[in-house]
């Protein structure tokens, strides 16, 4: 079951977006146990709403003052979709909206890896752009995964209120907006981005937009995310407004703007006046937040627990005492999984925070051992697997033999014994934590 997110909670949701605690190990005695994979998923921190006392000074500067301190760059005027281009958004309502009745989220693909583009009617899937100056090779963003992840986190936070998915890998199918993020810039350093403007997202459904940023350009992740967000929003028909704390402000005033829930005057002329009338009936302004809610609906919070299955070892499987084996866990969920924990006799013994999920077990002692795995998704939903019971047999033992005849206490002559394991593996001598964890 899913439920709409109250817009008032959007910052709280964004602040929790894929936040994962570092891998941790619990002090144990007994088996040597280490996760096959341990790490931290991408995490996204949203800024809290800007309070009056926290308003950046730059938001009250003139553009000339901003340029004097290295800001004030333009986010280029969007290019209207040519009227002769056919309407491709056939799945939308007449006003282009994809509201609460349309459960599938819209996808924003932030392309950090570069691409060769051709000129024509926008198609993100086919790497075609209507911005003819950008046909040809588009350079990759550069930098390392940490830099890219910081930008992606900031983009996620900006769009957390809406039924959107932000990804940095090209979707295998379906419609999506692609933002090319990299240093290729035919317009000069005073321009940070450009995009088509598609009124109500009615024509070229999978637009290609551009943010002229790189890992080494000196701009913060928040500023780069603002450029990405503005250019993507242009492809949904949003236009420039005269307010530096709105993402749709036409130049870079620093800080961490959001999509503001109020009518703000449009600057530079309007290409999509009909789109703005529903929420700003005087015809002079734009309410970006409400328009995005109308087009895509509010964010949908996943309330379903993950489905967790231990695929190895099998229930009832037997091992010889001292054996090594792996616990392999399969998890399915609509939301990203933040952690998987291994339980022994109901007690958590080890945490894994990166896919593929699993744990390496060495020198297992004799006894009966009950394993389970629990998984938690980014919305805090927890699922627990069915129990897997293992029998670990000590070969060549003498306990239970009768009259020296090699018979054990079950009378079957196997020379072995079965024993119960009380508690969470109390026989562990040392936990070799980070040293045994498989690296990414």
Image (cartoon, rainbow, N blue to C red):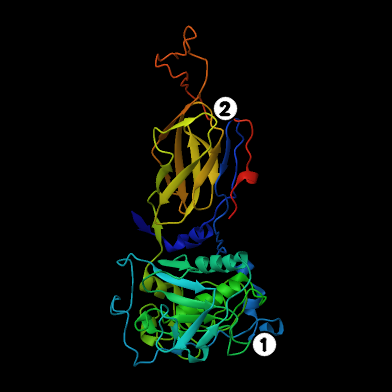
Q: The C terminus appears in which quarter of the rendering?
A: bottom right
Q: Please give the residue where the numbered disc 1 appears in the rendered image.
A: 64
Q: Nearer the viewer, residue 33 or 207?
A: 33
Q: Residue at x 56, y 61 (%)?
A: 45
Q: Nearer the viewer, residue 338 or 419?
A: 419
Rendered view: 255 above or below 367: below
Q: Residue at x 60, y 70 (%)?
A: 221
Can you see residue 277? no
Local SS, label 1: helix
Report the residue that reaches farthest toward the right: 68
Q: Are marks 2 and 1 in contact (CB under 8 Å)?
A: no
Rendered view: 170 above or below 137: above
Task: Tell us which disc is closer to us: 2 or 1.
Answer: 2
Q: Residue at x 47, y 33 (%)?
A: 346
Rendered view: 392 above or below 303: above
Can you see residue 355? yes
Neighbour class for label 2 at 10 Å: few (<14), some, many (≥20)?
few
Q: Residue at x 52, y 69 (%)?
A: 155
Report the residue that reaches farthest toward the top: 403
Q: Please give the residue where the numbered disc 2 appears in the rendered image.
A: 426
Local SS, label 2: loop
Q: Position of residue 226 (x, y in %)?
A: 55, 75
Q: Position of residue 96 (x, y in %)?
A: 33, 78
Rendered view: 77 above or below 312: below
Q: Position of residue 174 (x, y in %)?
A: 36, 72
């Amino acid at each position: 079951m899913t439920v709409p997110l109250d817009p008032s909670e959007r910052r709280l949701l964004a602040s929790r977006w894929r936040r994962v605690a570092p891998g941790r190990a619990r002090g144990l005695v007994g088996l040597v146990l280490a996760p096959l994979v341990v790490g931290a998923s991408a995490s996204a921190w949203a800024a809290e709403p800007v309070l009056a006392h926290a308003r950046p000074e730059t938001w009250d500067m003139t553009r000339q003052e901003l340029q004097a301190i290295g800001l004030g760059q333009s986010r280029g005027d969007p290019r209207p979709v040519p009227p002769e281009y056919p309407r491709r958004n056939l799945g939308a309502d007449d006003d282009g909206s994809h509201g609460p009745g349309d459960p599938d989220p819209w996808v924003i693909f932030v392309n950090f890896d570069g691409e060769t583009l051709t000129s024509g009617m926008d198609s993100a899937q086919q790497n075609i752009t209507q911005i003819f100056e950008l046909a040809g090779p588009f350079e990759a963003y550069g930098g390392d995964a940490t830099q890219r992840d910081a930008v992606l986190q900031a983009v996620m936070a900006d769009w957390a209120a809406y039924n959107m998915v932000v990804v940095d890998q090209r979707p295998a199918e379906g419609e999506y907006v692609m933002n090319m993020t990299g240093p290729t810039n035919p317009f000069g350093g005073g321009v940070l981005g450009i995009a088509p403007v598609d009124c109500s997202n009615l024509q070229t459904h999978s637009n290609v937009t551009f943010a002229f940023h790189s890992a080494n350009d000196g701009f913060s992740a928040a500023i780069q995310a603002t450029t990405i967000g503005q250019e993507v929003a242009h492809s949904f028909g949003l236009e420039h407004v005269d307010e530096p704390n709105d993402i749709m402000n036409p130049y870079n005033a620093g800080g961490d703007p959001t999509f503001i829930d109020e009518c703000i005057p449009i600057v530079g002329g309007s290409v999509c006046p009909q789109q703005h009338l529903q929420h700003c009936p005087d015809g002079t302004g734009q309410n970006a937040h409400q328009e995005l809610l109308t087009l895509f609906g509010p964010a949908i919070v996943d309330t379903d627990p993950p489905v967790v299955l231990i695929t190895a070892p099998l229930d009832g499987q037997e091992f010889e005492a001292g054996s090594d084996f792996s616990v392999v866990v399969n998890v399915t969920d609509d939301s990203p999984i933040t952690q998987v924990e291994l339980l022994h006799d109901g007690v958590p013994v080890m945490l894994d925070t990166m896919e593929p999920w699993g744990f390496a077990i060495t020198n297992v002692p004799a006894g009966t051992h009950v394993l389970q795995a629990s998984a938690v998704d980014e919305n805090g939903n927890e699922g627990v697997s069915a129990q897997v019971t293992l029998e670990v047999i000590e070969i060549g033992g003498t306990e239970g033999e009768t009259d020296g005849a090699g018979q054990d206490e079950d009378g079957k002559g196997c020379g072995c014994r079965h024993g119960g394991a009380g508690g969470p593996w109390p026989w562990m001598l040392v936990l070799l934590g980070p040293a045994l964890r498989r690296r990414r």
